[in-house]
Image: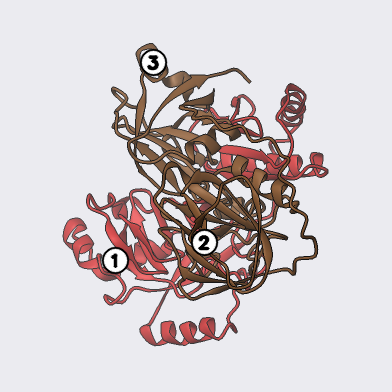
Amino acid sequence: MIKVIHPGFYTTIQDKGRFNYRAFGVPVSGVMDEVSYKLLNDLLGNHDNAAALECTMVGPTILFLKATKIAITGGNMQPQLNNQPIQNNRVYLVDEGDILSFKKLKTGYRTYIGVFGGLKSEVYLESKSYYYPVTPNKTIEKDSEIEFINLNDTTVNNKIEIVTNNITELTVFKAPEFDVLSTEQIHFLETNSFTVDKNNRMAYQFKERVPKGLSSIVTSATIPGTIQLTPSGNLIILMKDAQTTGGYARIFQLTNEAIAVLAQKKMGDKITFKVVDF
Amino acid sequence: MKDVEFTYQRLGKNALVITCKTDFTEEVLSYILTFKEIIKKAFNNYQLEIIPVYNSITILFNHTQVTDNIINKLQELQRNINHKKADFRYNLWELPVCYDNKFGIDLNAIMAATKLSKKEIINLHTQTTYTVYGIGFLPGFLYLGEVHKSLQIQRKSKPRLKITKGAVGIAGKQTGIYPQESPGGWNIIGNCPVPLFNLSKKPPVFAKVGDQIKFKAISIHEYELLQIKVAANIFSISPVQE
């Protein structure tokens, strides 16, 4: 098992999410960056729903009480094993007593830590993804212990090709209320860059205002990646812990890949939108 | 409902939003819920979720892209709906609410604004049978309508950072219960000890869209007894039998 020496800024256990309870108002939750999560489980040879730690901005310090294989993907928080630098996107064998820690965030915003076989954690409504009050925990806690299975395969496969790039363009589809936008508003959205303001697992907000905004709609369903435009011109991009319904106009829908790109953006980063057809 | 049109719009590759072109009414909701049952049957091989709310129905496919074929199939199913015969069953639930000032923290303000007495406010709130128009916002949050005209108070301009779990509130035409502690701007008139979202039950939410809800005033003593039962997990709620 692992012991949490220090939990980091906002670290949770996540898997793909919970899909059968959205009609009850339970958000999907699950990893914000599905691309990094898939790479993590592929590197470790894990099941594609194996639970991992999702770290935000400041990584945790973790003591391994048992040997296992680990990998780290997503943002670069300068991981260290026993105070020696290690790399993202590689598999490492760790021993009982090894300590994983992180230094300052260099690129990206969210980092994933995976172990061989995935983390063991209580399942609530068919998923291990942390979401209070469905799960009793909001984040991992100092001194808590998290189990994982015994290592039965010490081979380390680092043959997966990694492609890293710094994408700032978010690909979007038109959403149900797109047609209510004026030509000027569409032009504004397609030609400007937008600066990330407040953000968390529920939503990303942006500094710039879209002139005139859009009227509210009769409350309807929303999903992660839905981009809302409020009457006062605020853009809100809903993410994995967002409400399942909303009364703001839905103008765009991010592709799944674009959601993963946005999950690695932090306050001050700039993005642009590219509208594509279905 | 014969001539009412619906729009079919994609929400990303895996979801479809079907919206009635008119505003929401009980008749529109009834039609949507009938359509929901038809969709469930016709697509029972697919992993999907259906979210009916107010005047729209959204289909979320877990693994399937929404193709033109799927849209055509849905439109054909819709054309064949026998709209005169609503084909869904709903329950009537009676929810206990304690309107004591300890819980109804906005009651005094509402009395001042509406010139109604506390008794009149409670009567107006409990005499209406509300329809569940949707579930969302929070796990187990029921969108209920419509509040009696005299009791339609706009939500507070400055929301509270913390509203107690179970708080019963009013915002315009809507009334509802906060299923968990949450920030919120509704006017709070009481508290309901029955859990709206309960992980130890299957399903975790007892009410369905289309169900009817009535509130019943209870004393603090009755409230405390129910609270104990709920905490001991020996409380369960049953629909009102016709």
Classify mark 1: residues with Cα within 10 Å, few (<14), some (14-19) or many (20+). Answer: few
Amino acid on which disc 2 is placed: Ile
Location of residue A125 in the rendering, given as x and y in whole percent from the top left corner: 65, 62
Asked if the residue at tag 2 contacts the one at tag 1, i.e. Cβ–Cβ closer than 8 Å, the answer is no
User: What's under tag 3, amino acid-wise?
Assistant: Thr
The residue at the point 41 percent across, 50 percent down is: A57
Chain identifier matching the brown colour in the rendered picture: A
Q: In terms of secondary structure, where does tag 3 sit?
A: helix
Numbered marks: total: 3
Tell me, for residue A191, which label it has, or none.
3
Q: Is residue A16 left or right of residue A228?
A: right
Residue at the spot 61% in from the left edge and 65% down from the top edge: B204
In front of the other: A197 or B200:
A197
Q: Residues within 10 Å of mark 2 (few under 14, many from 20)?
A: many
Q: Report in which chain the residue with disc 3 lies.
A: A
Q: Position of residue B123 (x, y in %)?
A: 35, 66
Tag 2, which chain?
A: B
Q: Which residue is mark 2?
A: B213
Q: Which-is-in-front pick, marks 1 and 3?
A: 3
Using the image, determine if residue A86 lies above or below residue B219: above
**Mark 1 chain:** B
Q: Which of the chains is red?
A: B
Left or right: where does residue A8 sit relative to residue A23? left
In the picture, the quarter occupied by the N terminus of chain A is: bottom right
Q: Give the foreground label among 2 and 3.
A: 3
